[in-house]
Amino acid sequence: MMKVHQGPVVGLHPMFGPDVTGLIKQTIIVCDGRETEQYQWLLKQFQVWGAKIYQVSAQAHDQAMSMVQVMRHFSTIAYGYHLMAEGADIEQLLNMSSPIYRLELIMVGRLFAQNPILYSDIIFSNPDNIMMMKRFAYRFLELLEDVEQGDKTAFVSMFKQVSDWFGDYADDFLAESKTMLLKANELKKI
């Protein structure tokens, strides 16, 4: 942006979709550009409207988005593609689903109800995303090899390492997901 505009520049990335009707409790990522004093009024207005402003460098934003968006969307698309290619019966899967799997399936279906150009733009936006996806594929195959070889010890060891890495967040996320599942169950069609 700074190459094409000589005036004030700020990078804004709203972390919500077009169906959100207000900014209360919504996150907007801010990457400072040029003449920061010229756009402070805008950031303050977002906060007045209830938004949470999260400031990071453009590089930190791009790295985080490769994890938050690219990997999540790519994995979801691959899973949806796999379900289709396997001829899965969605209704049967829903009927046999636990609440958490139902919610995951809803999130997969939700993605495919949207514009494919949006998701292809996100995934194809940065050439560094390719290496991230390749590292993910490598780790997937590494775990698959443990399963294929019947090496539960290696699998459990990896699981514990990841659990330790998540630390207190794992328990926090478990509690938060329980609350979400209760709310999601209230919305469930009969």
Image (cartoon, helix red, strand yellow):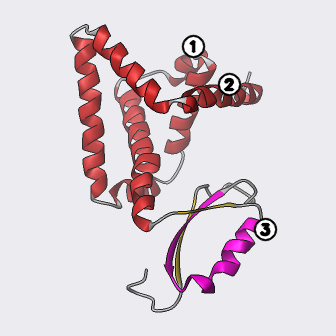
Q: Is residue 189 magenta?
A: no
Q: Say if 179 sits above or below 92 in the image.
A: below
Q: Position of residue 165 (x, y in %)?
A: 44, 31
Mark-to-mark CA distance, 3 and 1? 45 Å
Q: Say if 75 sits above or below 125 in the image.
A: above
Q: Position of residue 178 (x, y in %)?
A: 68, 25
Neighbour tally class for label 3: few under 14, some 14-19, many 20 plus, Cα within 10 Å: few
Residue pointed to by mark 1: 96
Most extreme residue toward the bottom is 6
Decide which of 44, 183 is in the foreground and name it.
44
Mark-to-mark CA distance, 3 and 2? 31 Å
From the viewer's perspective, is the residue at label 1 or at label 2 nearer? Answer: 2
The three-letter code of the residue at mark 3 reads Val
* SS of the residue under disc 3: helix
Asked whether, in this view, residue 14 is left or right of residue 31, the answer is: right
For the record, the magenta segment spans 27-47
The three-letter code of the residue at mark 1 reads Met
Residue pointed to by mark 2: 178
Residue pointed to by mark 3: 48
* SS of the residue under disc 1: loop
